[in-house]
Amino acid sequence: MKVGVIGLGTIAQKAYLPMMMTEHPEVEWHLSTRNKEKLEVLGEKYRINAEQLHTDWEDLLDLDIDAVFIHTPTTTHAEIIRAMLEKRIAVFVDKPISDRLEETKELIKLSKKTNTLLMTGFNRRFAPRVKELKEIQNKNMIYFQKNQADQPTKASRYRIYDLMIHPIDTALHMVDGPVKIINTGIVGTKDALKRAWVMLESESANIMVSVNTESGARLETMEVQSPAATMRLENLTEFTKYDEFGIGIKTYGDWENTLLKRGFAPMIDAFLETVEISGENPVSLETVLQSHEVCEKILENAGF
């Protein structure tokens, strides 16, 4: 299998390349970035042949590759995704697909039209502890939040689609079926988001998702309540169960792989396996669209 990796920034280098290169030596990897020096350094680090290093992503279109991972800035996603799908090349893209809802809809439609895989990188869906939350029966209240210590200086559209989309998508992943938006809010301006929240309702559960960019701590919490117990997950690793018998805590050992704990390793595996067997999208386009629609509604209701 021949696979391209477009964009070699911090996320690609920390969360993707180590797993790709060590766990999937059977793949012929092609790396692409405009930064020639970075390309050469990474090529040497992972012992990739010079002919598999590209300063122009469009070179990949003529190499008969099977799939690409896209780790470029969000504003560049649409052009690259469109070009790949039109060539019937399977696509994995970091969230969001686009921070413009109509563009996201267009690309999802193209994926279906060309019958070509378009998978969005919602790694939390693949995190083992999140899977445990998902399996809880009779969920009735869901509280998810993702906070930053003191960074209230970035634009609302960027923050909603870059930061808040993660807890939104993961919370929606907890329930099956349609949801309706009850209330949304943003504190801040179009150019600087401080806090945001959305309240949703499914047939069986109420859902609250929030972000706070001036909370004093970088902290992500997920809480799922049911008649049997309340489960709380902190930073994807510390799992606490509260029930009539007391409190139970599960944590990972220091030796356990961070990319596994955060869902990156199983997500990469799932994409490559799907490409190889032409299987069903591990992150359905319908659920991806729903997450993007909620993000857009929060911005729309705030007049942004």
Image (spheres, grey):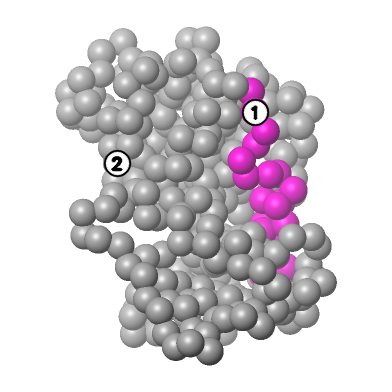
Picture quadrant of residue 86: top right
Q: Nearer the viewer, residue 162 or 274?
A: 274
Image side of residue 261 versus residue 209, left or right: left
- Compared to 191, does 101 lie above or below? above
Location of residue 139 with respect to 1 vertically, above or below: below
Amino acid tagged 2: Gln
Image point 57% across, 44% down: which residue? 120
How far, Cα to Cα, is label 1 from label 2?
A: 27 Å
Q: Is residue 204 visible?
A: yes
Say whether residue 20 is magenta.
Answer: no
Give me the residue at 37% from left, 65% from top. Answer: 237
Q: Could you say where residue 134 lies in the image, as x and y percent from the top left?
A: 59, 62
Q: Which segment did they paint magenta? A: 278-300
Q: Main secondary structure of the magenta part?
A: helix
- Estimate the x, y position of residue 210 in percent, counting from the top left: 56, 78
Q: Which residue is mark 1?
A: 279
Give me the disc on residue 13: 2
Local secondary structure at mark 1: loop
